Image: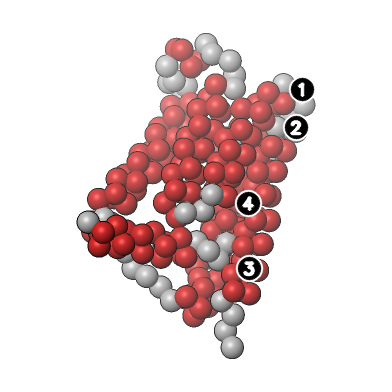
Amino acid sequence: MNKNLSVRSAERNALGLHFKDGFWEILLGSFFVALAFQDILEEQGISILTSYTPAIIVFVLMMVFYLIAKRIITTPRIGMVEMKLGNNPQRLRMFVVAIGLQLFTLLIFLLGINEKLPLWIIESPNWTMDAIFGLILFLFFTLMAYTIQANRFVLYGFLLGLAMPIGVILKAQDPTLNTYPSMFAGAVMVLFGIYVSIKFLRDYSIP
């Protein structure tokens, strides 16, 4: 039993080390900052799907940066650990839950676009949908924080989850105000990611 616990602890430490360079936070933070402009584009008459194009472009570009940075910066310093989901039932369950949350989010999004949401959602306050998305984001980041042993991801989930309904409420006052909460949350992720990256380079310097 103690041996199994030691193995699980070692695996969690290795997984946490994989996110210790901060590059994943820079990637996601940049995406959420770009995503904040979606409502502005939609207000200018651009279709919903087209308004997501800048965020998608930023995500693709940052993903390229992430893969290159992992290869030339992270791997030479800490190596690379390959983990198989089937070897750890707990990790497999967390992976299934995370994928389930993402699929549920996609389902709600598609139903909203096609105006096929349940009646109770349609008749609820206009921030209800965003509150649901915010709760899903918070749960996802909390699960991630537990998995990789990085409490700062709970803060990201809280800021992003709160930003969505607050943005809708602010939109009633001014269409441009709803971009600020998501932009702020994304900027916090980017700044934390840069700080973590600098600390990583300092702690795992190459002679």
Rendered image: mark on residue 173: 1
Q: Look at mark 3 in the image and give the residue it sits on.
A: 199
The residue that appears at 31% across and 62% down in the rendered structure is 6
* Marks 1 and 2 close (CB-CB < 8 Å): yes
Per the image, label 1 sits on a secondary structure element best described as loop
Whether residue 34 appears in this view of the structure is no
Per the image, label 2 sits on a secondary structure element best described as loop
- Which amino acid type is shown beneath numbered disc 3? Lys
Q: Position of residue 201 (x, y in %)?
A: 61, 74
Which mark sits nearer the N-terminus, 1 or 4?
1
Per the image, label 3 sits on a secondary structure element best described as helix
Rendered image: mark on residue 98: none
What is the distance, in whole Å, between disc 2 and disc 4 at their CAs? Answer: 20 Å
- Which amino acid type is shown beneath numbered disc 1? Gln
| 184 w.r.t. 44: above or below | below
What is the distance, in whole Å, between disc 3 and disc 4 at their CAs? Answer: 15 Å
Which mark sits nearer the N-terminus, 2 or 4?
2
Q: Residue 167 sits in which quadrant?
A: top right
Q: Look at mark 4 in the image and give the residue it sits on.
A: 189
What is the distance, in whole Å, between disc 1 and disc 3 at their CAs? Answer: 41 Å
- In front here: 65 or 134? 134
Whether residue 139 appears in this view of the structure is yes
Q: Position of residue 25 (x, y in %)?
A: 57, 56
- In front here: 161 or 173? 161
Per the image, label 4 sits on a secondary structure element best described as helix
Q: As drawn, which residue projects farthest toward the bottom? A: 207
- Which amino acid type is shown beneath numbered disc 2? Leu
* Marks 2 and 3 close (CB-CB < 8 Å): no
Q: Residue 200 sits in which quadrant?
A: bottom right
| 132 w.r.t. 56: above or below | above
